[in-house]
């Protein structure tokens, strides 16, 4: 069985990467616009899963997520960021935001697109890079430091070190 | 610019494994059935004790069926034993799902058991497994050892296929390690803190590990009344996921032969240019039941022709659908899927219907070795598990 070479490290730009997704429209869309409701407050509701997502990656704001600088965090920083947000002012009137688990995070991967593998109308300015999930990797013996990460470059779930590199954060709530 | 350090998910092992009533009114007088006769008629001194056991039934798509509870007596009594009983709603409702009943059961002298029958209403709507309770009271001629039993109406219908499964992860991590068994205050808000896995309302292991909930279906698509039997004793053909609403093919034992043998491999092939990403893949390149149908498209056609579980709308799952079966608490070689419901799963790759956006010569697989995603060339020799339902 041959595996594609996507496993070799891909060059990814962590900051100021905007738009430029390459999409193949003869692949069925996994996150069409019609599956989302824009709530007009920086959040979108995904009718399929029932989850509410913050549109902008942490560090960015504004209707096109064009304000600010996208930020990276270690896994612990990412978890603590959410905790601080909820115990402080919250966002869009909610104080129950979460770091998504890996199944939730993968539910907004767009199968048609790479670089980033996301619907950029719904999630503008998504980084072509990794986003943390809240799901530790099960193998605690041989890989104690790994956590599941959504790779929004190629659009797949991978496991990465919690501390070696900082990645991005997109928040979810509901369910 | 920097590198996303991409680590292959390593192939290491790790195993893993493992009701309640309220009150309702009822007015129906239900018939009383006699059980098998016990030995002598004497009872031998001490007062016998009554126990009622849990019961289950597949919901069915229409009409009424009988959910039968067995009440046993610890020893036969010298005179008739009577006991009152009443049904009460759990998650099932007596207004729609079953007919409530409140009556008296008599176990004649010399017998050691009787049965209580509750009428269940079938429908074709996707619902979770539902429960009701039967509670015994006012026994005469016996004591009550086990007063209440749960009856489960097993879902056998498919739904929209959109609800996500939880991950199965019920442990925490810190910077040094994973698999910690308590919540971590300095690493707050982890997967294990929330969701179906973390809620006692949904994390029973009786219907699939933690938040997962599955029903085993027979060759006709009917739910087994006894969901606890193992595959070797009572093999099943399909499983319905009571969270996502998807119905799944169950593979038959490795190398035992037949259309759905777990050992068979297929090349990825989709002749539909609106869905194949611009590359139809490789026809008939796998090793399967015959020498002509060993690709995904032909396998789908063959399973539909066979009418697996009574259906002919089986298809290759999308990425999100196949990923919904991954139990992320199991790592490497343990099978990242609930083997109690999906026996004969190989620690390997399974095709999805989804072409890789960055290279149309590839399609995505889910790896039931570690739960990861992998793209493979469409001429790869890969296994298949079909799905139906969803919208």
Image (cartoon, rainbow, N blue to C red):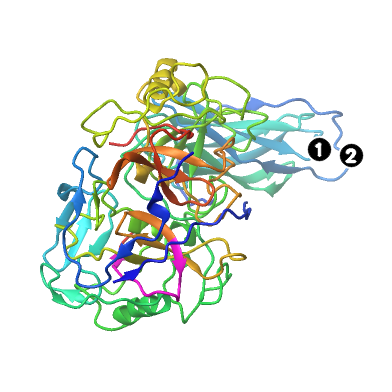
Residue to which mark 2 is pinned: B44
Task: Indicate the quadrant where residue B330 lies.
Answer: bottom right
Residue under the image location 67 percent in, 44 percent down: B139
Residue to which mark 1 is pinned: B75
Residue under the image location 34 percent in, 71 percent down: A167
Q: Is residue B294 above or below residue A26?
A: above
Residue B91: x %, y % from top left? 44, 47
Residue A124 visible in the current orientation = yes
Going from N to C along the chain, the mark reached first, 2 or 1, is 2
Badge 1 crowding class, 10 Å Cα cut-off, few under 14, some 14 to 19, many 20 or more, is many
What span is colored magenta in the figure? A159-172
Task: Indicate the quadrant where residue B155 lies.
Answer: top left
Would you say A117 lies left or right of B66 here? left
Badge 2 crowding class, 10 Å Cα cut-off, few under 14, some 14 to 19, many 20 or more, is few
| Total marks in image | 2
Q: Quadrant of the C terminus of chain B?
A: top left
Would you say B330 lies left or right of B121 here? right
Give yes or no for contact between labels 2 and 1 (Cβ–Cβ under 8 Å). Answer: yes
């Amino acid at each position: 069985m041959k595996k594609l070479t996507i496993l070799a490290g891909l060059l990814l730009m962590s900051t100021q990467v905007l738009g430029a997704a390459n999409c193949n429209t003869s692949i069925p869309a996994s996150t069409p616009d019609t599956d989302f409701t824009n709530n007009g407050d920086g959040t979108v509701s995904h009718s399929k899963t029932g989850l509410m997502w913050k549109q902008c990656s942490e560090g960015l704001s504004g209707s096109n997520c064009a304000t600010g600088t996208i930020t990276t965090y270690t896994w612990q920083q990412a978890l603590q960021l959410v905790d601080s947000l909820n115990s402080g002012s919250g966002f869009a009137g909610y104080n129950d935001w979460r770091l998504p688990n890996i199944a939730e995070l993968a539910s907004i991967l767009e199968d048609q697109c790479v670089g980033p593998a996301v619907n950029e109308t719904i999630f503008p300015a998504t980084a072509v890079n990794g986003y943390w999930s809240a799901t530790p990797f099960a193998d605690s013996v041989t890989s104690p430091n790994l956590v599941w990460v959504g790779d929004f470059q190629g659009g797949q779930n991978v496991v990465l070190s919690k501390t070696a590199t900082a990645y991005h954060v997109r928040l979810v709530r509901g369910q | 610019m920097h590198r996303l350090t991409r680590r292959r998910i390593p192939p290491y092992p790790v195993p893993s494994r493992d009701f309640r009533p309220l009150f309702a009114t009822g007015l129906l007088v239900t018939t009383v059935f006699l059980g098998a006769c016990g030995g002598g008629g004497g009872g031998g001194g001490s007062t016998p004790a009554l126990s009622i056991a849990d019961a289950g039934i597949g919901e069915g798509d229409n009409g009424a069926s009988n959910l039968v509870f067995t009440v046993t007596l610890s020893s036969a009594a010298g005179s008739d034993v009577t006991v009152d009983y009443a049904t009460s709603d759990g998650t099932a409702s007596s207004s729609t799902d079953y007919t409530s009943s409140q009556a008296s059961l008599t176990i004649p002298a010399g017998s050691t058991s009787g049965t209580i029958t509750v009428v269940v209403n079938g429908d074709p709507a996707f619902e979770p497994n539902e429960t009701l309770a039967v509670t015994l009271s006012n026994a005469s001629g016996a004591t009550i050892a086990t007063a209440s039993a749960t009856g489960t109406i097993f879902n056998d219908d498919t739904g929209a296929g959109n609800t996500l499964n939880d991950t199965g992860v019920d442990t925490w991590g810190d910077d040094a390690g994973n698999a910690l068994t308590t919540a971590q205050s300095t690493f707050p808000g982890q997967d294990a803190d929330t969701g179906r896995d973390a809620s006692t309302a949904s994390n029973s292991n009786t219907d699939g590990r933690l938040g997962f909930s599955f029903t085993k279906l027979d060759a006709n698509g009917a739910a087994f009344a006894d969901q606890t039997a193992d595959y070797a004793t009572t093999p099943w053909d399909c499983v319905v996921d009571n969270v996502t609403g998807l119905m799944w093919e169950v593979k038959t034992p490795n190398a035992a032969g037949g259309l759905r043998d777990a050992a068979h491999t297929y090349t990825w092939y989709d002749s539909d240019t609106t869905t194949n990403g611009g590359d139809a893949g490789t026809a008939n390149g796998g090793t399967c039941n015959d020498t002509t149908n060993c690709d995904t498209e032909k396998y789908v056609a063959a399973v539909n022709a066979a009418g697996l579980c009574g259906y002919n709308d089986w298809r290759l799952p999308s990425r999100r659908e196949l990923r919904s079966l991954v139990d992320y608490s199991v790592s490497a070689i343990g099978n990242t899927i609930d083997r109690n419901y999906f026996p004969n799963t190989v620690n390997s790759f399974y095709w999805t219907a989804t072409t890789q956006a960055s290279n149309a010569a590839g399609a995505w697989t889910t790896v039931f070795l570690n739960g990861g995603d992998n793209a493979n060339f469409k001429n790869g020799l890969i296994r298949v598990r079909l799905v139906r339902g969803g919208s």
